[in-house]
Image: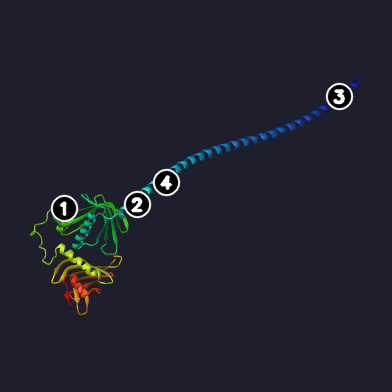
Amino acid sequence: MRPGFAAIGCVLLGAAVAWLVFETRHLAELTGVAEADARQAHAAARELRQQFAAAAAARDASAAQATRLEAEVATTAAQLSAMADTVRQRAEHEAARAAAAEEAEARALQPMPEGVRSCLTALHECLRAEGYSRERFLSARALDGDGLHGVELLVVQQDGFGVDFVRAGRMVAGLDRSSARLVLRFFDGYRTVGGERVALPAEGHPLVFAPIDGRLFEARLPVLLRVEGAYPEPDAGRARPATDLDPITRLQWLDRFDRLLARAGTAEVLRVNRCRGLADGCFLDVQVLGTDGKHRLLLGADCARLCVEVDRAAGVVSLWLRDGILRRGGVESTITAEGYRMLLPEVTPQQATEIMLGMVVTK
């Protein structure tokens, strides 16, 4: 019996071993599958973690972007608000400027008050009588105890080719009797210097005229002038030459020269700008200027003596200049004692004699 049991045992053992081998293989297969699933699960988990990290990074970037955009929107809103304020202020400023320009234009179109016009006319005449003709007042709005208001003035430059402009809210005129000195001082405005605007200083921009006949200015401009000092005693200063003309007579002769030269028919517009005296039918210390139609200086002559010369036989009238300097086209030449004649082609001897009250010389 024992051999049979042994065989059975061997069979059972073989079956057990076979079962164990089968189970081991099955378990190995299950283990392999589990490991593969685990690896896939780990890979999926790793991928999920990476996706989560990317999503978190994207969320953080989106949050940062949103914060940056909010800041930019706030900055843009502030800039737009500031721009709107600037545009509004500029619009208000332009509206104010337009209103001021309209008001200024309306004032400019209004005629000057007659008292102001008379004052400026008298000031021009007095300055011209003293030989100052480069200054020309264009307008003024009012005249009171504080001076002239809203003044505009042109000043021809010394060479005659340029013009400076002065616009002032107020102008005062001071006369110093003792020094025969007139000062016109301009406040609250600007003047042009070399084509550029320059604000008038707080103490005022002065134009000084000296020497002048203070009594002439004082008599013609009593409302405008602020007078100080006292006139020198008659015997205290240099005696006036007997040939000198008094200011009123000088103005009258300058007006007659204006009338004479207005019909001269010369290429230049001639004007006797200054005349100090009169002797032996000749005008003394005379300045003659010639300009074109745009008031640009073309010639200038300063001479010791000037006569209005008539040639009745030839029907010719001339200005006869002697002892001086002639400037024309940038060239300066000497006028000798023999003289230099400026022909007045449209003036007849009869007209010259009548206008100059016979104060002519015959050739």
In the rendered structure, the answer to whether residue 125 lies left or right of residue 165 reads left
Q: Which residue is mark 1?
A: 227
Q: Residue at x 81, y 27 (%)?
A: 20
Q: Nearer the viewer, mark 3 or mark 4?
A: 4
Q: Tell me the CA gap for discs 2 and 1.
A: 38 Å
Q: Which residue is mark 2?
A: 102
Question: 71 or 292, which is in the foreground?
Answer: 292
Residue type for callout 3: Leu
Question: 29 or 149, which is in the foreground?
Answer: 149
SS assignment at label 1:
strand
Q: Which mark is residue 87?
A: 4
Extreme-left residue of the structure: 235
Extreme-right residue of the structure: 1
SS assignment at label 3:
helix
- Residue 51 horizontal/vertical position (percent): 63, 37
Q: Which residue is mark 3?
A: 12
Mark 3: few/some/many CA within 10 Å (<14, 14-19, 20+): few
Earlier sequence position, callout 2 versus callout 3: 3
C-beta proximity under 8 Å, tags 3 and 1: no
Q: Nearer the viewer, mark 4 or mark 2?
A: 2
SS assignment at label 4:
helix
Residue type for callout 2: Glu
